[in-house]
Image: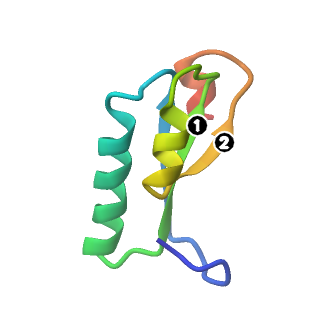
Amino acid sequence: MINKNEQIELSIVLPCLNEEQTVGICVAKAVQFLKEYNIKGEVIVADNGSTDSSIGIAKKRGAVIAHVEQKGYGMALR
């Protein structure tokens, strides 16, 4: 992960809608990838209106949350 003053080399975007069973694992793997390859990056979870614990889990694992109001997988990735 990066400090606020560093240039981002890579953003990993994960769409999310009620993914509390898997989002933590996915974010952890993405964060580990960035560390392992010494890439200055961030993990963004594009939340599409989750009503479960997905957002809290993703934040706890180090993700930045982007709230996407328009529904759909494609909109979450945009």
| CA neighbours of label 2 inside 10 A, class few (<14), some (14 to 19), many (20+) | some
Q: Is residue 21 or residue 30 the one in the foreground?
A: 21
The percent position of residue 29, horizontal first and vertical second, equals 28, 53
The percent position of residue 57, horizontal first and vertical second, equals 46, 42
- Residue placed under numbered mark 1 in the picture: 46
Q: Quadrant of the C terminus?
A: top right
Task: Let me know if residue 32 appears in the view.
Answer: yes
- Residue placed under numbered mark 2 in the picture: 66
The percent position of residue 61, horizontal first and vertical second, equals 42, 54
Say which amino acid is labelled 2.
Ala
Tell which residue pokes out farthest to the top in this image. Answer: 71
Q: Is residue 55 or residue 75 the one in the foreground?
A: 55
Say which amino acid is labelled 1.
Ala
Instruction: Name the residue at 74% across, 23% down.
Output: 69
C-alpha distance separating marks 2 and 1: 5 Å
Tell which residue pokes out farthest to the bottom in this image. Answer: 5
Marks 2 and 1 in Cβ contact (< 8 Å): yes
